[in-house]
Image (cartoon, grey):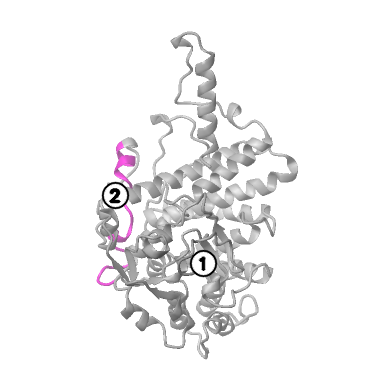
Amino acid sequence: MKNIYHILFISLLLITLAACKKPLDIEPVDTIEQGEALITSKDVEVALIGSYADLGGANFYGGRPFLIADFLANTNAIEWSGTYEELTQTINKSILKTNGFVSNIWRDGYSTINDVNNVLSAIDKVDEAKRNRIQGEAKFIRGSAYFDLVRLFGKAYNDGDPSVNLGVPIVLTPTTSVTKDNFVGRGTVQQAYQQAITDLTEAEADLPETNGFFATKYAAAAMLARIYLQMGNYAEAARAADRVIKSGNYTLARTYLQAFPTVPAAGSPAQPGGNTVEDIFAMQVTNLTGFNGFNEFYGSSTYGGRGDAAISQAWINANYTANDQRRQSFYDDGDLFTSKFANQYGNVSIIRLAEMYLIRAECNVRLAPAAPIGGVTPLEDLQMVRNRAGLTTTSASLADILQERRRELAFEGFALHDAKRTQTNIGNIAWNSPRLVLPIPQRETDANESLVQNEGY
């Protein structure tokens, strides 16, 4: 489903054209009155569904921003054989400001934000019984979008002064016309993080504990845990992760591969995967709608992908012991591929429970409080994740937990952001190199002269 604003705009335009008798009767087509677009509670609810659709598009939470982050962090894990020059630029850490994949992430991110700004501008039209939930879902989407945009297009929060470093434009009202008067410059990294925190905190308060496959109170808390961890605010990160774990709404899947959509049987067509018991929030994909951007490149051709991003056997050997069940999550189809994304119609997992255990464990190790936040030791949290992989655990040092993140969350889009927050160089490239920050797309700076380009571009 496309943006409801665009759908209604086209409908109104057709009505206008049908009604006019002279060319001069045609209304301008670069603006639309909000009151004409979102009139009833149902209109706003449909617009919210459109917001989820844009959020889950291929160029946003459908997977490509996470893929780009993996590629930028790659040294020896991914064996790239693709023909997309713009993704080759990413693997080589030599992105051009005309890169189409990067431009599309920016475009679809801000399209999603404008969708929910439209929803929030008409929230008073929503039936009172539904208002808090719809407002919470919209703010969950907007806060999540700002977080992922700023950590791709801005410097890391711990790189210099976030109150000075440029982040991304912050737009909180609908864009109903395109003129120089409403062009917005870049806010700071700190402002973008604070907007994400504000939206997600309010979303957590407004959302219900269960909400089908849409955003819930605990999805907002989980995203807050991720944001606070990226900022180095370990106490708040641990508390947010603890709220999710203690909700009881999610459990670790019995085996590692059961945490991901089912791999199709050999020779059988892929079927929609649905959420797993571990998914706190996932984008919905079916064989009719949606898109799994991870499968597009990480999946072999046998399973609907391009097979462009194979996994190095040497990397697998270096990271997984023989008795680590996660070692079995790779399959041989001429090259080695991760089974996490072998179902082309599998939902795109955005946040799963294992991450929350690892966040709480890491934060408690870093803080070393007299009593661990959540009342559970880092060793106990680490054991939850490692035991599922068939491993024993006797130590829970910071190094142990960070290594476990690399194993558990591999190829899910975490490597770049973890390298930045832990100040870990990527090969011979410094963790805070401008080469690891995406350029502001040239088509945006050409159109909006108030957008300052990133260093190195």
- Residue 457 visible within the image: yes
What amino acid is at disc 1? Asn
Q: Please, is residue 350 above or below residue 130 in the view?
A: below
Query: Taking 33 as reference, is 224 above or below it?
Result: below
Dot 2 alpha-carbon crowd within 10 angstroms: few under 14, some 14 to 19, many 20 or more:
some
Q: With respect to residue 240, does 330 lie above or below?
A: below
Q: Earlier in the sequence, mark 1 or mark 2?
A: 2
Relative image position of residue 433 (x, y in whole percent): 29, 62
Q: Secondary structure at mark 2?
A: loop
Farthest residue, direction right: 129
Up the image or down, 285 lies above or below 280; here it is: above
Task: Give the labeled residue for mark 2.
Answer: 99
Crowd band around label 1 with a 10 angstrom C-alpha radius: few (<14), some (14–19), many (20+)? some
Question: Is residue 361 one of those drawn in magenta?
Answer: no
* Residue closer to the observer: 219 or 214: 214
Q: Residue furthest top?
A: 22
- Horizontal side of residue 269 vs 39, given as left or right: left
- Tag 1–tag 2 contact (CB < 8 Å): no
State whether the magenta stretch is mostly helix, strand or loop.
loop
- In magenta, the rendered stretch is 427-446
User: What distance separates the C-alpha of mark 1 from that of mark 2?
Assistant: 33 Å
The residue wearing badge 1 is: 233
**Which mark is drawn over residue 243?**
none
